[in-house]
Image (spheres, grey):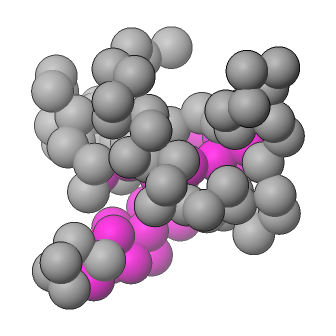
Amino acid sequence: MTYIPPAQRRRLEERSDGVCEGCGRHLPIKDNGDHLFQPHHCPPVGSGGSKIPYPDCQLVVLHSSCHRQEHDKGCPHTEEWVSRLREVYVER
């Protein structure tokens, strides 16, 4: 799994508002109060996504099950998520 620095994880968690950006369900909460999620690269690193440092605009916040399903299915939502993230970061 890719290392994401704590400050960046907090930014991603704030952006997602504690919700999986794949299915829309609330993310589980860890003992320390942070949300449990796995960042997914859009586009995947193997398909031209950025290497370290990973920009926030190329990471999607997913439940572990959504993340696993995305990879098992060959990352079918990449174009949709890239488009959505581009809109989020252009608006800022």
Q: Give me the residue at 73% from left, 21% from top.
A: 32
Q: Give me the residue at 69% from left, 38% from top.
A: 35
Inspect the magenta stretch and tell me whether residue 74 lies in it. yes
Pinpoint residue 19: horizontal percent, then vertical percent.
Answer: 70, 60
Inspect the magenta stretch and tell me whether residue 9 lies in it. no
Q: Give me the residue at 22% from left, 72% from top.
A: 89
The quarter holding residue 10 reads top left
**Residue 64 appearing in the image:** no
Check the image and name the residue furthest to the front: 32
27 to 1, vertically: above or below = below
**In the depicted view, which residue is nearer to us: 33 or 6?**
33
Position of 70 with respect to 4 (left or right) is right
**In the depicted view, which residue is nearer to us: 70 or 90?**
90
Q: Give me the residue at 33% from left, 70% from top.
A: 85
Q: What stretch is highlighted in magenta?
A: 58-87
Position of 79 with respect to 1 (left or right) is left
The quarter holding residue 79 reads bottom left
26 to 3, vertically: above or below = below
The quarter holding residue 18 reads bottom right
Pinpoint residue 92: horizontal percent, then vertical percent.
Answer: 18, 78
27 to 79, vertically: above or below = above
**Residue 3 appearing in the image:** yes
